[in-house]
Image (cartoon, rainbow, N blue to C red):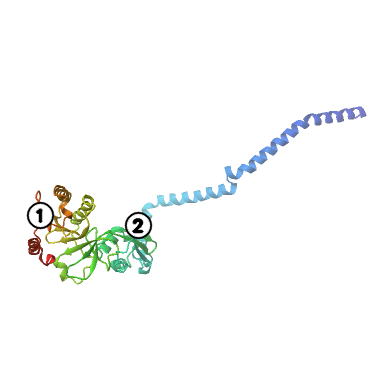
């Protein structure tokens, strides 16, 4: 090869190099972009080859086992029944009979929302729940056991503290009257459902109610007993509240409830005694009394009347002769009005 031909070939190579330089640079940049894109998204978009192989192998083994069991289901039926029975029996024993889920006395917490309920009696009431499965306990069962000894309990909230504890929050009926018995020195609170709860002093500013019931004189323990039948308590409460609304300026000394007669007597500081029957016409009785009082120039505060009888529907009897009136009251109601 001549020198001229060599120079010509070299010139062509240099020309092709500079001509393709821009193209090679673009290709390099494109490859670089693809590489960066793949490294950024490869972990998020597609699993590795090892992971794919492992998952495929796991699926293969699982599918193989399913096929074997399906092909031999008649052969393994007895085994399945025995295994299932064993699992059910074991689970039942663990949940209902094992000590792990049995309620422990030390894990039972009882709290009250008022001072009426006796916590010690409440713990005694639920002793039958101890050492039973926590899964068999419900709110109605706990409420029934608590109210068997304390009828003043209105509502309970039971929280299960797994595996073997309980938290019980007790709410009582509200106190409505401070109660005394004529033949007893003890004093009680009467709740809105008619239950008596022992109370030493009237520190709640409740109206005094004398409960006249001969059966209580024979009882040594009156606490948490029914003092007034629950169906009559709404009439007594309504009479108290509506009387205060109708006569806001009249001062009430006390109330007296005669259980046998089912009568409520409102005894005023003026000395007047209002005799009422506990019935669903309580409002009408008080409205009749107010109408009569308006017509007779506020006789209710005059100190001239001994008692006014509202017990007979549509009629009002007024007694002004105090000696005669007291004899009438004593003859009907005994020594309470002696």
The quadrant of the rendering that contains the C terminus is bottom left
Disc 2 vs disc 1: which is toward the camera? 1
Numbered badge on residue 318: 1
Q: Is residue 108 left or right of residue 194?
A: right
Q: Position of residue 243 (x, y in %)?
A: 20, 52
Residue at the limit of the structure toward the bottom, as seen here: 220
Horizontal and vertical percent position of residue 167: 36, 62
Residue at image location 53% in from the left, 49% down from the top: 55
Q: Which residue is mark 2?
A: 81
Going from the N terminus, do you reach mark 2 or mark 1 first?
A: 2
- In-front residue for pair 234/241: 241
Q: Position of residue 114 (x, y in %)?
A: 32, 62
Does any portion of residue 89 appear in the rendered image?
Answer: no
> How many labels, in total?
2
For the N terminus, give its image quadrant.
top right
234 is higher (above) or lower (below) than 10: below
* Observer able to see residue 10: yes
The residue shown at (51%, 51%) is 58
**Where, by quadrant of the figure, is residue 257 drawn?**
bottom left
Quick one: 296 or 21, which is closer to the camera?
296
Mark 2–mark 1 contact, CB under 8 Å? no
Binning the other alpha carbons within 10 Å of mark 1 as few (below 14), some (14 to 19) or many (20 upward) gives: few
């Amino acid at each position: 090869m001549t020198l001229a031909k060599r120079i010509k070939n070299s010139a062509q190579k240099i020309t092709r190099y500079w001509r393709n330089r821009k193209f090679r640079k673009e290709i390099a940049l494109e490859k670089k972009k693809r590489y960066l894109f793949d490294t950024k998204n490869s972990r998020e978009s597609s699993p590795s080859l090892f992971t794919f192989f492992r998952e495929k192998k796991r699926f293969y083994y699982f599918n193989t086992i399913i096929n074997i069991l399906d092909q031999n289901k008649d052969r393994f039926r007895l085994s399945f029944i025995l295994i299932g029975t064993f699992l059910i029996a074991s689970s039942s024993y663990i949940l209902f009979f094992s000590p792990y889920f049995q309620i422990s006395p030390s894990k039972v917490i009882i709290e009250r929302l008022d001072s009426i309920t006796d916590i010690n009696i409440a713990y005694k009431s639920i002793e039958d729940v101890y050492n039973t499965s926590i899964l068999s306990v419900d709110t109605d069962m706990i409420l029934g056991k608590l109210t068997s000894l304390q009828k003043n309990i209105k509502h309970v909230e039971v929280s299960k503290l797994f595996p073997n504890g309980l938290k019980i929050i007790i709410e009582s009926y509200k106190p409505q009257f401070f109660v005394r018995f004529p033949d007893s020195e003890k004093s009680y609170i009467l709740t809105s459902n008619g239950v008596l709860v022992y109370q030493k002093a009237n520190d709640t500013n409740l109206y005094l109610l004398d409960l006249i019931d001969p059966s209580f004189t024979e009882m040594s323990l009156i606490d948490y007993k029914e003092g007034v039948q629950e169906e009559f308590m709404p009439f007594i409460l309504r009479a108290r509240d509506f009387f205060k609304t109708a006569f806001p300026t009249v001062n009430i000394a006390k109330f007296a409830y005669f259980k046998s007669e089912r009568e409520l007597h409102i005894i005023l500081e003026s000395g007047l005694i209002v005799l009422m029957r506990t019935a669903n016409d309580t409002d009408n009785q008080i409205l009749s009394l107010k109408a009569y009082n308006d017509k007779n120039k506020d006789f209710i505060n005059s100190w001239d009347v001994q008692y006014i009888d509202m017990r007979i529907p549509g009629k009002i009897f007024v007694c002004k002769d105090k000696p005669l009136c007291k004899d009438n009251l004593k003859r009907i109601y005994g020594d309470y009005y002696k």
